[in-house]
């Protein structure tokens, strides 16, 4: 069994389409098909159910996929460890976040400490983040809510109150706090379902007897402040994401402890390079110095 066979198998297993997998690997479809066929011959079992070019993992394929991902994960960790031991830091720190409000300050502090290390950040929903964690494709995640799992390490770094943002001319603008039930008839702007803050807020509102009515649902939390200021709707915004716009007022929630937990997350088996270890220290120090 060859390493190339495993890499090709993973691509086909994830896309379940031979043409698309060949395109992603920059190889011919014929070459890819022959490689998968040789792998199946080596194993003595078929790994896919086939319908034309469309493939679907069968029971053998599902079980083998878990083993193949684990094998390639360990090889990738070994490569990183050897680079670290030889004094050659891997050039790019891979990060994924569900919450980006504190990220610019954290990255600025990290760059000051390790200016030669690059980083690559992806903004993801929670389930997408879990997938990348299990594949070993990210060093750290900054997530709200925290992610639990057998292979996942999770360190809570911040308890972040969620506030109600209203435009300056709103009926509640002169208040400093508000009860959730007073918001029953309001129109909201927010992020889509699947993002931690949205799911948390919807759940708490449902527990007091109403579902928030959204006139806008998007993928960019930073845009919500501009929409509130334009009087499109009001919003639930975490304290760490407060914007200093003059035309927005922020109210505390009176009758519920509406807070989100921000966690630093990594795969338990992932090798922690010196750069990654330094990034973890920067995150912990940042929230220790800037408690919410």
Image (tube, rainbow, N blue to C red):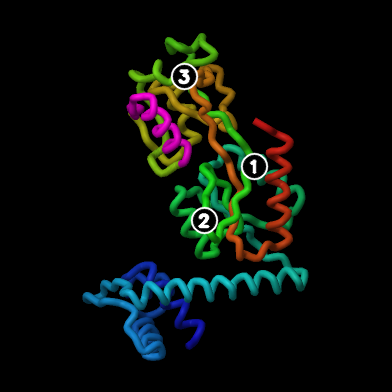
Residue carrying label 3: 166
- Left or right: residue 140 versus residue 165 is right
Label 3: which secondary element: strand
Marks 1 and 2: CB-CB under 8 Å?
no
The answer to which quarter of the image holds residue 204 is top left
Q: Find residue 267 and report its horizontal and vertical position in percent.
A: 58, 60
Residue carrying label 2: 149
**Could you classify mark 3 by the number of other residues whose Cα lies within 10 Å: few (under 14), some (14-19), or many (20 or more)?**
many
Q: Find residue 82 and report its horizontal and vertical position in percent.
A: 70, 74
Residue 151 in view in this figure: yes
The answer to which quarter of the image holds residue 261 is top right
Q: Find residue 203 and report its horizontal and vertical position in percent.
A: 40, 34
The first of marks 1 and 2 along the sequence is 2
- Magenta-tinted stretch: 196-214
- Residue 263 sits above or below residue 89 on the image: above
Q: Is 175 within the magenta?
A: no
Tell me the distance, in whole angstroms, between the alpha carbons under discs 1 and 2. 18 Å
Residue 157 has which mark? Answer: 1
Tell me the distance, in whole angstroms, between the alpha carbons under discs 3 and 1. 28 Å
- Left or right: residue 282 versus residue 47 is right
The first of marks 3 and 1 along the sequence is 1
Tag nearer the camera, 1 or 2: 2
């Amino acid at each position: 069994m060859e390493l190339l066979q495993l890499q090709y198998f993973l691509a086909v297993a994830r896309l379940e389409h031979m043409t698309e997998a060949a395109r992603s690997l920059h190889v011919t479809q014929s070459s890819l098909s022959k490689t998968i066929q040789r792998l199946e011959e080596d194993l003595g079992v078929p790994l896919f159910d086939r319908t034309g070019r469309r493939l679907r993992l069968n029971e053998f394929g599902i079980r083998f996929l878990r083993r193949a991902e684990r094998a390639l994960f360990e090889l990738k960790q070994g490569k990183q460890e050897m680079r670290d031991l030889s004094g050659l830091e891997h050039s790019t720190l891979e990060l994924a976040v569900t919450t980006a409000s504190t990220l610019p300050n954290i990255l600025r502090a990290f760059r000051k400490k390790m200016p030669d290390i690059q980083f690559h950040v992806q903004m993801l929903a929670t389930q997408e983040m879990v997938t990348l964690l299990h594949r070993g494709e990210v060093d750290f995640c900054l997530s709200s809510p925290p992610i639990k799992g057998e292979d996942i390490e999770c360190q809570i770094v911040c308890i972040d109150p969620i506030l109600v943002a209203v435009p300056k001319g709103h009926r509640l603008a002169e208040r400093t706090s508000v009860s959730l039930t007073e918001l029953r008839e309001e129109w909201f702007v927010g992020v889509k379902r699947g993002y931690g803050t949205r799911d948390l807020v919807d759940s708490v509102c449902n527990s007091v007897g109403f579902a928030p009515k959204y006139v806008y649902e998007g993928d960019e939390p930073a845009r919500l402040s501009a929409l509130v200021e334009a009087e499109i709707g009001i919003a639930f915004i975490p304290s760490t994401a407060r914007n200093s716009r003059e035309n927005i007022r922020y109210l505390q929630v009176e009758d519920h402890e509406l807070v989100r937990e921000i966690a630093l997350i990594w795969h338990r088996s992932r090798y922690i390079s010196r750069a990654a270890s330094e990034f973890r220290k920067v995150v912990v120090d940042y929230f220790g110095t800037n408690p919410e």
